Image (cartoon, rainbow, N blue to C red):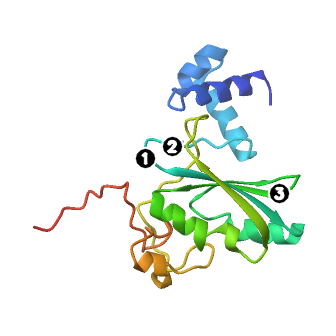
Amino acid sequence: MDERDLMIIRGLAEDGRTPLEKIGERIGISRVAVTKRLRNMTNRGLLKVGAMINPNKLDFKVLFISIEVANYEDLQKLVETYKDCPRIISLIHAAGGYNLLALMYAEDERTLMSILSGCSIRTRKEVRRSEVSVGRVIYPKYLPITLSSGGEDEVTPCGLSCDKCERYNAEECIGCPSTRYYRPTWFRSRKKEKV
């Protein structure tokens, strides 16, 4: 990476919709050169360009879960099980009293309670102990949250079934975003209502 690559990244970080031609003008190279550099950085896994969401605007709750596992093998099992969880924002291998940190979101209070009680990374057998903090985002305002109006899967990425969940069936949880059972409260469907 060089100074021009850094300037491209800064330009996109300021406003991801900035035309590549404008970024090129600022740093003295063509749009084609910016495109090539951006493609190179993306192909090398250095950066990913995508949408960021302000969870506060959707009234989402953000959870920071500190987890202690016995060994690296247990940590790897948890990461493998939860890496595709749509509510996981980030999984971090840490040093200290807790060795895995999970940043997650919940769409509403009922779903938050489901995550805290049974449908959670912290309830897995690999977890020795955990601590949860719930709050609102102060900074940065935008997080890499993948929104969904529902998937087609019967089973969640972590192996659970919403249709067999007591909280889901009692309408105390909106379900997993990756499944066909998901009932998002924040999403207004464009489907025409039957009269």
Q: Quadrant of residue 7?
A: top right
* Crowdedness near tag 3: few (<14), some (14–19) or many (≥20) residues, C-alpha within 10 Å: some
Circle 1 sits in a helix, a strand or a loop, which is it?
A: loop
Which dot marks residue 53? 2
Question: Mark 2, mark 1: which one is toward the viewer?
Answer: 1
Determine the CA span between mark 3 and mark 2: 28 Å
Q: Position of residue 164 (x, y in %)?
A: 49, 85
Q: Residue furthest bottom?
A: 164
56 or 34: nearer the eye?
Answer: 56
Q: Quadrant of residue 33?
A: top right
The image quadrant where one finds the N terminus is: top right
**Callouts 2 and 1 close, C-beta under 8 Å:** yes
Give the residue number, with chain letter if any, for mark 3: 98
- Compared across the picture, whether 115 is left or right of 193 comes to right
* Crowdedness near tag 1: few (<14), some (14–19) or many (≥20) residues, C-alpha within 10 Å: few
Determine the CA span between mark 1 and mark 3: 30 Å
Give the residue number, with chain letter if any, for mark 1: 58
188 versus 6 height, above or below: below
The answer, for residue 33, to whether it is visible in the render is no
Of the image marks 3 and 2, the number of the one nearer the N terminus: 2
Circle 2 sits in a helix, a strand or a loop, which is it?
A: loop
Question: Mark 1, mark 3: which one is toward the viewer?
Answer: 3
